[in-house]
Image: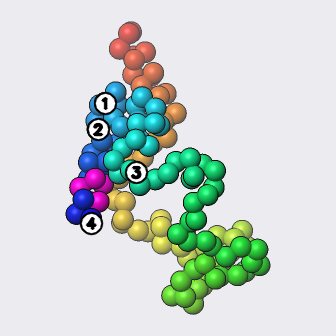
Amino acid sequence: MIAGLFDSLYVFNQALLNRNPLKRLGANGGFEVKAHPFFASIDWDALYNRRVKPPFEPCRNLGETETANFEKEFTVMPLHSVDESGGSADAKNLRLESETFLNFTYEEESYLETLRDSLAAQRRK
């Protein structure tokens, strides 16, 4: 059972990650994903009509400071100083000094589009 599940999961992931978007699982609609063997045990009608009991039900109607849905190891962690805006000043400084993303670049897509348009305009000159 478990080996078959992992095989099915592997094939499912491969189909989702196909580089060709036209051949990717779901390219022709969500029905392709729902029909995949990985989801063979799912009764989609029952799920849609909320007749499937969830494997986990979070506590509901708890107070704003209630932590029943969090593991104890996280709720007893010490809090670092928090500035008045609600963000942690220590965490912000640590992010700025961190080398985690050294040599990593990210540009907003709108900036990339502007850059692309600018380069295209220069080539036309």
Residue 11 image position (x, y, % from top left): 26, 48
SS for dot 3? helix
Residues at badges 1 and 3 in contact (C-beta under 8 Å)?
Answer: no
Give neighbour class at mark 1: few <14, some 14-19, many 20+ (Cα, 10 Å).
few
**Image: 26 above or below 60:** above
Residues at badges 2 and 4 in contact (C-beta under 8 Å)?
Answer: no
Please give the residue where the numbered disc 4 appears in the rendered image: 2
Farthest residue, direction top: 125
Three-letter code, disc 2: Asn
SS for dot 4? helix
SS for dot 2? loop
Residue 78 image position (x, y, % from top left): 57, 88
Residues at badges 1 and 2 in contact (C-beta under 8 Å)?
Answer: yes
Looking at the rendered structure, which numbered label has been put on residue 51?
none
Residue 114 image position (x, y, % from top left): 49, 27
Give neighbour class at mark 3: few <14, some 14-19, many 20+ (Cα, 10 Å).
some
Q: Which residues are magenta?
A: 5-9
Residues at badges 4 and 3 in contact (C-beta under 8 Å)?
Answer: no
**Image: 117 above or below 48:** above
Q: Earlier in the sequence, mark 1 or mark 3?
A: 1
Looking at the rendered structure, which numbered label has been put on residue 23?
1
Please give the residue where the numbered disc 3 appears in the rendered image: 39
Please give the residue where the numbered disc 2 appears in the rendered image: 18
What is the quadrant of the C terminus in the image?
top left
Three-letter code, disc 3: Phe
